[in-house]
């Protein structure tokens, strides 16, 4: 019996090799480096300035709470162990800094202001990749997690060139993916030249949100339409009609390769990195704390991506 060639399989798994293996290996080693560096600006802003309002004054600024929570997520520590880790760290650095206790960290987590993602300094237009995944919710003091464990949906928007997470949103599990695209686009200030997503985002509201963004030329929308999709005479669905005609002429697999839709795998890679490094469940029980936790996690992943990311190519 003669077996078919690898290229003849409908969904054959591709093989990839890394070009910058030496740099990527050094970056992976730097991720485990325990060297801690605190800038003078961070030390000066560690204590909160007096608010002038009656009552107890804040001791710690938001940057101190954010730094403590980031250390907690990187090393996967409970709040009490995070407090002890910071106290020992201050003693090793010979600094006189007040360390927030675990109750302060838990309370201030829900009141942190908007957290900005760290972005690389570039003016290059963005090819945006969008996808969503599920994160499990903290079950409290239950001895055994329930069978139908509650979970929430995390929406991510990733830069196809750098692999950075540039926008995120946390919603309930019953929220449709296509309804959160306007909220993700509103978090992005740079110019977007293309948006790629899977078939769950094939909705008129997504095309309208992309076209209404900015004053320049509209971005290319790369969303595979349904099998029986037909061109529709609507200005808002211009990009969808273009995809339908291209797939009819080239075929779906060839359209994936030529249009650039195959780069959407990078957002799935970001989801995998999130669940591998940060975890598959959230530590906070309240919605406000969960939203802050997701923002902090995305900032940590961006910092790791800046240290080193692989540059791979497909092996035919």
Image: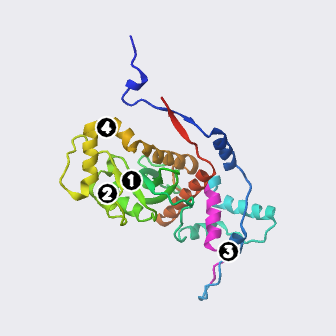
Q: Earlier in the sequence, mark 2 or mark 1?
A: 1
**210 and 30: which is toward the camera:** 210
Magenta segment: does it hold 57?
yes
C-alpha span from label 3 to label 4? 54 Å
The image quarter containing residue 100 is bottom right
Residue contact at pointers 2 and 1, CB within 8 angstroms = yes
- For marks 2 and 3, give the one nearer the viewer: 2
User: What segment is highlighted magenta in the picture?
Assistant: 56-73
- Position of residue 248 relative to residue 201, above or below, is above
Q: Earlier in the sequence, mark 3 or mark 4?
A: 3
Please tell me whether mark 2 sits on a helix, a strand or a loop: helix
> Residue, x 51% and y 52% (percent of image)?
281
Q: Earlier in the sequence, mark 2 or mark 3?
A: 3
C-alpha span from label 2 to label 3? 41 Å
Q: Earlier in the sequence, mark 4 or mark 2?
A: 2
Q: Which residue is mark 3?
A: 45
> Which of the numbered marks, if any, corresponds to residue 195?
1
- On the question of residue 27 being in view, the answer is yes
Magenta segment: does it hold 98?
no
> Residue, x 36% and y 66% (percent of image)?
215
**Location of residue 28 in the rendering, given as x and y in whole percent from the top left corner:** 65, 45
Q: Which residue is mark 2?
A: 206
Q: Which residue is mark 4?
A: 252
Please tell me whether mark 3 sits on a helix, a strand or a loop: loop
The residue most toward the left is 233
**Location of residue 125 in the rendering, given as x and y in whole percent from the top left corner:** 46, 57
């Amino acid at each position: 019996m003669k077996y078919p060639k690898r290229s003849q399989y409908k969904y054959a798994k591709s093989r990839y090799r890394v070009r910058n293996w030496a740099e990527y290996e050094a970056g992976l080693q730097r991720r485990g480096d325990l060297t801690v560096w605190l800038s003078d600006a961070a030390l000066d802003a560690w204590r909160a300035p007096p608010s002038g309002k009656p009552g107890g004054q804040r001791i710690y600024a938001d940057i101190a709470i954010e730094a403590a929570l980031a250390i907690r997520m990187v090393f996967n520590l409970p709040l009490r162990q995070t407090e002890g880790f910071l106290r020992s760290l201050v003693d090793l650095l010979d600094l006189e800094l007040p360390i927030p206790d675990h109750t302060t960290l838990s309370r201030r987590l829900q009141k942190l202001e908007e957290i900005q993602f760290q972005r690389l300094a570039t003016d290059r237009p963005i090819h945006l990749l969008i996808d969503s995944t599920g994160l499990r919710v903290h079950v409290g003091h239950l001895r055994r997690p329930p069978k139908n464990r509650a979970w929430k949906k995390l929406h991510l928007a990733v830069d196809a060139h750098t692999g950075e997470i540039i926008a995120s949103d946390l919603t309930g599990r019953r929220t449709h993916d296509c309804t959160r695209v306007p909220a993700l686009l509103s978090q992005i200030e740079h110019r977007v030249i293309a948006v790629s997503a899977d078939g769950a985002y094939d909705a008129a509201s997504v095309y309208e949100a992309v076209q209404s963004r900015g004053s320049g030329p509209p971005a290319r929308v790369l969303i595979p339409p349904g099998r029986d999709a037909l061109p529709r005479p609507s200005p808002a669905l211009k990009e969808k009609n273009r995809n339908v005609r291209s797939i009819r002429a080239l075929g779906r697999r060839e359209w994936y390769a030529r249009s650039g839709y195959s780069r959407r795998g990078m957002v799935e890679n970001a989801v995998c990195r999130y669940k591998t490094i940060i975890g598959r469940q959230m530590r906070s029980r309240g919605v406000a704390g969960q939203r802050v936790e997701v923002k902090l996690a995305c900032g940590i992943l961006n910092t790791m991506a800046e240290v080193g990311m692989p540059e791979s190519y497909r092996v035919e």
